[in-house]
Image (tube, rainbow, N blue to C red):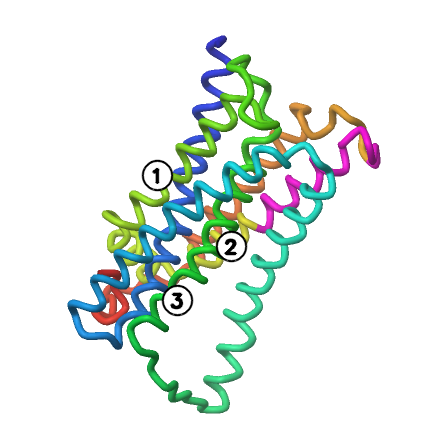
Amino acid sequence: MELSLILEYGWVLLLLVALEGLLAADNALVLAIMVKHLPEEQRKKALFYGLAGAFVFRFGSLFAISYLVDVWQVQAIGALYLLFIAANHILRKFLVKKGEEEAGVTKEKKQSGFWLTVFKVELADIAFAVDSILAAVALAVALPDSGLGHIGGLDGGKFFVIFAGGMIGLIIMRFAANLFVDLLHRRPGLEVAAFGIVGWVGVKLAVYTMSHPALAILPEGFAKSTEWKVTFYVVLIGIALAGWFLSKEKQEVPAEEKAS
């Protein structure tokens, strides 16, 4: 591989690591909240099953999408899904939560037993896996081909970048989640920024879809053009910086919300 190609692949991998770190922290926080009502020993088992499920579902999603990635209908569904989860998360964050706080709403939920909790954790894992792999594919799919053969319908180099990003996300979820959870609590705007980036990545996948020869809504080479790549990364970095600098820094993290 040429040096310029290695640098481009390395840059995308670094972006994936950062995005996966924030998403994995948010996922770990959700899982920790889902299992916190269980006794400590059962809580550890439920989180272990959750990690195992995340591993299986991410592998499954990656191999499934590697065979479907060139189908424009799948690309379009992926783009719409990324845009939906970004909009849904941000709207719920600002509108639903704000409305509940203004109304003084407090919800008392009946706590689930161990196996029902594990089932809910696995369902969450499926959603997390799809989110993670689709975001990774949307970032990697416009990279130049690496010449390392193909896995399914996906270039070998792109497959490796997506695979590495997914595995790094799992490692972060297991070993470094607390650090990222602390960061999200100190800089809560980063959570919104992370899903803003997911939405922007959805736009990237939509552009790639509209450049597909079967649709030709945009010129075929537009998704891989320097102008679009520069625009995409400038906006992406801008979203991340806005999330950091527009956050009101908090010093303490509630102990019950930390991932185990």
Above or below residue 150? Residue 27 is below
Number of callouts = 3
Task: Find the magenta span and give its range.
Answer: 199-217
* Residue 168, numbered circle: 1
Answer whether residue 171 is magenta in the image. no
| Mark 1 neighbour class, 10 Å CA radius: few under 14, some 14 to 19, many 20 or more | some
Looking at the rendered structure, the secondary structure element under dot 3 is: helix
Q: Within 10 angstroms of label 2, few (less than 14), some, or many (20 or more) residues?
A: many
User: Which callout, 2 or 1, points to the residue nearer the camera?
Assistant: 1
SS category of the residue bearing label 1: helix
Looking at this view, name the residue that lies furthest to the front: 115
* Image quadrant in which the C terminus is located: bottom left
Camera-side residue of 223 and 168: 168
Residue 129, how many percent across, how many down? Answer: 46, 50
Q: Is residue 113 left or right of residue 72?
A: left
Which residue reaches farthest bottom? 104
Q: Amino acid at mark 2?
A: Phe
Label 3 sits on residue: 119
Q: Which residue is mark 2?
A: 195
Residue at the spot 76% in from the left edge and 32% down from the top edge: 211
Is 206 inside the magenta-drawn segment? Answer: yes
Main SS of the magenta part reads helix
Instruction: Name the amino acid, label 1.
Output: Ile
Which mark is drawn over residue 185?
Answer: none
How far across and how far down the image is residue 231, in percent? Answer: 63, 34
Q: CA distance from mark 1 to mark 3?
A: 24 Å
Q: Earlier along the polypeptide chain: callout 2 or callout 1?
A: 1
The answer to whether mark 2 and mark 1 are in CB contact below 8 A is: no
